[in-house]
Amino acid sequence: MVELNMTLIAQIINFLILVYILKRFAFGKVLQAMSDRQARITGNIEAADRERAAAEELKREYQEQLAQARTQAQAIVEKATKLAEQAKDDIMKEARAEHARLLKDAQEEIARERERAVADIRNEVVALSIAAAGKVIGQNLDAKANAKLVGDFISKLDAQKIGGVQ
C-alpha cells in the first residue's frame, strides 16, 4: 500500500510537472493557434458576407440595367413603328398626288383631243355645208362669201347647241 501511495504521489507530481511544462510552452501556442484560427474563420465569414452583399448589389444593378435596356428597346421599336407609319403615309401621299397628276394630264389630253375632234368635225361640216349649199343654190359663190355663209351657220348652231356639240 505504501508503494501504491508512492506511485500515486509520483504520478500526481509528474502530472503537475507536465501541466506546468505544457502551460509554460504549449498551451500559449495552442491557444494562440486556436485564437488565430477563430479570427481567420471570423474574417472569412465577414468576407463572405461582404462578397454576398456585393453580389446582391451587382445583381440589383444588372436587373436595373436590364430593365433600362428593355425600356430602350421598346422605345426603339415604337420609334421604328412610327417611322414606318410615316414612310407609309408619305408614300401614300405621293401615290395620291401622282394619281391626281396623271388623272389631270389624262383629262387635259381628253379635252385637247375633244377640241381637235370638234375642230375636225367643224371643218368637215363647213366643207359639206359649202358643197351642199353650192348644189342647192346651183351656183358657186366666191370663197369669201362661202366662208361667211358657213361661219354664220356654225355660229347659229353653236348658239343653239344643235347636235349636242358645244
Image (cartoon, grey):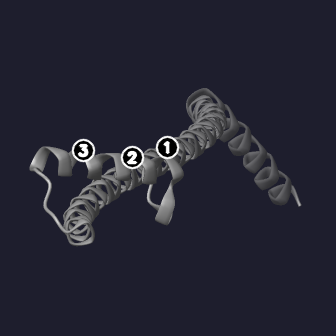
Mark 2 and mark 1: Cα distance apart in space: 56 Å
Please name the residue shown 22% across and 66% down the image. 124
Is residue 63 at least partly visible in the picture?
Answer: yes
Q: Residue 64 got which mark? A: none
Depth check, front residue: 165 or 8 = 165
Q: Which residue is mark 1?
A: 86
Task: Report the amino acid beneath label 2.
Answer: Ser
Residue reaching furthest to the left:
142
Residue 20 screen position, x and y as percent: 67, 31
Secondary structure type for disc 3: helix
Q: Which residue is mark 2?
A: 155
Left or right of 66 in this view: 106: left
Mark before the other along the chain sequence, 3 or 2 = 3
Rendered location of residue 99, percent (x, y): 40, 55
Above or below — where is 66 with respect to 40? Answer: below
Where does the image place residue 126, in percent across and percent down from the top left? 24, 60
Judge the density around disc 2: few (<14), some (14-19), many (≥20) Cα neighbours within 10 Å: few
Indicate the amino acid at tag 3.
Lys
